[in-house]
Amino acid sequence: MIAAVQHFRHSVNNMTQELLFSGVKPTNNLHIGNYIGALKQWTEIQHRYRCFFCIVDLHAITVPQAPKKLHESTLTVAATYLAVGIDPNRCRIFIQSEVPQHTELGWILGTMTKMAELERMTQFKDKSKKRGEPVGAGLFTYPLLMAADILLYDTTVVPVGDDQVQHLELTRMLARRFNTQFGETFTVPQTLIQKVGARIMALNNPTIKMSKSASSTANYIALTDEPNVIRKKIMRAMTDSGNEIHYDIEKYPAISNLLTIFHHATGRTIKDIEKEFAGKGYGDLKKALAEAVITMLEPIQKRIHYYLDDTGELMRILNRGRDEAIGLAETKMKTVLERTGLGRQSN
Ligand code: TYM
């Protein structure tokens, strides 16, 4: 269930013509944080919008990627979109680098953005600190490309996990800035985040978020982890001191995280789960949670294999997505070039 909607002014019913855009970077393994914070949310609301789901491979290369592995990850992410239940008859799935207008608009937006506005981005600050070496300019300008992804399509809603909210704020600001300077051109998008599950924390450290780029695989459960690996990771997950099974992020961050995952894996309310485990130990909760996560992931894993074993269907879906995306992106870029005075005047 989509529990919370940030900046969300409209009623979400009967909005079939509004456009939803979101994406995932094809880096390393997608994990249950990506699924709960983003992909699961997409499947729940896909029928309300015209949807574009992008595999943002140009974002992936902001940190070094092995070319062959990047090709593979790109297809795996596309297969994962379908495997979690994105309906290719309703939604378009495409690869960012196959639509050149993303980088074109990203450049133009960069000319309208102050260095300080990018320096403020906490994700850039965190990532550059973590790498401990000189960081690429791409990591710095990353939010401009993300803004371009969204603004090219007159996107009205962007469902994401809460680590992307600041990038969305920048996107909204750039849309307004462009519209003020050059005339109404871009739709100002709304950010959609869930009340419970917008930030799934690392299993081995509940003070940091679950992350694909974590140094230890104990941080996350990958969508492709085998049952025994899932059991091991959950049984070893950090717990709080004490033995209370109660949802309270401040007091019991580790158990609250496990309860959140449990809630999303089963669809049961947190209250209901707390009731079942009242008076029981953390071990009991973890055992049941591991089985719930295995049950949640099993059909997804089967379908990922299905789409990757014979990629014919996947290729057709990606071609269709690319062609439709290019159609919209070209039209928008024509307007942008005209308004900004780039190239020759059309009349
Ligand atoms: P990425 O690939 O890091 O993550 C994909 C989605 O998963 C969400 N997410 C999480 N949600 C809850 N808990 C977590 N621990 C967690 N980790 C990740 C992210 O918030 C995201 O929704 N910049 C984006 C990709 C992007 C994009 C876009 C998204 C590029 N262009 C346009 C939306 C619209 C990113 O790096 O996501």
Image: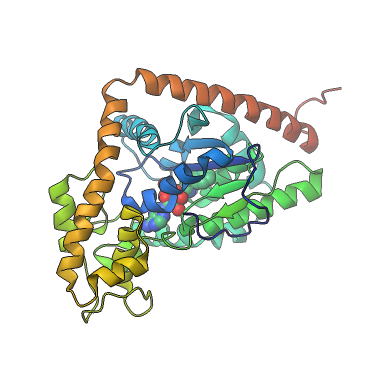
Is residue 116 toward the left or the right of residue 286 in the image?
right
Q: Which image quadrant is residue 15 in?
A: top right
| Up-down relation of residue 101 to residue 151 (above or below) | above
Can residue 113 be seen?
no
> Measuring 30% from the left and 59% from the top, which residue is drawn there?
262
Quarter of the picture containing the C terminus is: top right
In this orientation, which residue lies closer to the viewer: 270 or 282? 270
Q: Position of residue 284 (x, y in %)?
A: 16, 67
Counting from the top left corner in percent of width and height, residue 1 is at 46, 54
Q: Residue at x 31, y 31 (%)?
A: 72
Residue toward you, 251 or 182: 251
Q: According to the image, what is the colour scheme of the structure?
A: rainbow
- Please tell me which residue lies in front, 223 or 12: 12
- The answer to whether residue 135 is above or below residue 85 is below
Left or right of residue 165, residue 65 in this image: left
- Observer-nearest residue: 213 or 155? 155
- Tell me where residue 318 appears, x and y as whole percent: 45, 25
Q: Is residue 62 above or below residue 87?
A: below
| The image quarter in which residue 316 lies | top left
Q: Is residue 4 visible?
A: yes
Residue that appears at 55% across and 45% down: 146
